[in-house]
Image: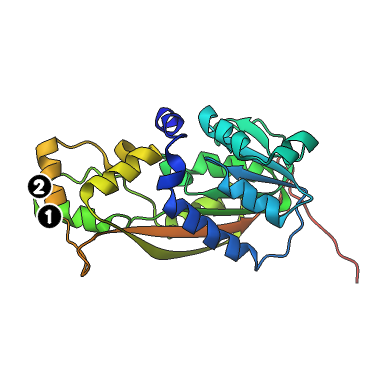
Amino acid sequence: MRGDFSGAADTYDPAAALAREVGARMGARLDLVKIAPARVADIGCATGDGIRELQRRYGKALPLALDSALPMLRAVRCRTPRLQRLTGRGPRLVNADVRALPLAANTLGLVWSNLMLHWLDDPLPALRELHRVLEVGGLLSFATLGPDTLKELRAAAQKVGAGDTARRFLDMHDLGDMLVAAGFGDPVMDMEMITLTYASPRAFLADQRHLGVRDALLGRQDWRIWRRLLGTWPRDAGGRLPASFEIVYGHAWKPEPRQIADGRAVVRFHSR
């Protein structure tokens, strides 16, 4: 996936309608949270919409933009206003894998991740790493794709007897369990469907290619099978092809530790 995203940095923005819409909805959810983090991070930042939103909301916080693809980080730098660059107020750019962050433990007040975690075969190591770098009382806010994503395409594949090679995604209950296993307290999960429409299969495939996710999202089929499958994709009343994306939102806090590093339990006494 790193190579695909690296190659997509120049074409990403025009095709990223879903990521922008989900990011706006993630931002609206932050309206309900009263925090004043000293450091914020956008994990899997792509070209930087998320970190710019965090800068707008938390102007006094140190912003970190992290991505495994260097060209995406270069795009963040190019989109950073010149005054921010000159005054040192632009995002700090970090090239790293979310499963091995070059950050000290207990240093981030808010971690934001928009449509990144579902590309990991197993998100649990990443969630454990995000828990490590968050400070006690810090917030993880993320969105990821759920299992009903591209249900129209999967139904078309079943109808023509093609193999369902599209990537499978975890449901919100499994993700909630993973958050608890990673050490987060009382995760809150919800989901919604967002449907994009396309004039043709070619337009849909072009968007996924421009995002750098076509093969990772759809898998590989013989072109003859793809032609039959895409020809069976049902159109809506306006003659366009609907593509549904199940969006799973989650937020969770890092609670006070129940034990210290050597395994001893933490017991707190409160005076009356």
Give the image location of residue 190, x and y in percent. Answer: 48, 65
Badge number at residue 61: none
Image quadrant in which you'd find residue 74? top right
Question: What is the secondary structure assignment of the residue under circle 2?
Answer: helix
The span from disc 1 to disc 2 (Cα, nearest Å) is: 6 Å
Q: Amino acid at mark 1?
A: Thr
Badge number at residue 228: 2
Give the image location of residue 47, x and y in percent. Answer: 54, 40
Question: Which residue is depicted at the point 38% across and 59% down?
Answer: 246
- In the displayed orientation, state which residue is furthest to the bottom: 272
- Relative side of 105 to 144, left or right: right
> Mark 1: few, some, or many residues within 10 Å (few <14, many ≥20)?
some
Question: Which residue is depicted at the point 9% across and 47% down?
Answer: 228
- Relative side of 125 to 257, left or right: left
> Mark 2: few, some, or many residues within 10 Å (few <14, many ≥20)?
some
Give the image location of residue 29, x and y in percent. Answer: 59, 65
Camera-side residue of 112 and 241: 241
Residue 254 makes an appearance in the image:
no
The residue that mark 1 highlights is 232
- Relative side of 161 to 178, left or right: left
Give the image location of residue 119, x and y in percent. Answer: 42, 41
Question: Which residue is depicted at the point 42% across and 34% down?
Answer: 8
Camera-side residue of 84 and 171: 84
Question: Which residue is depicted at the point 36% across and 57% down?
Answer: 245
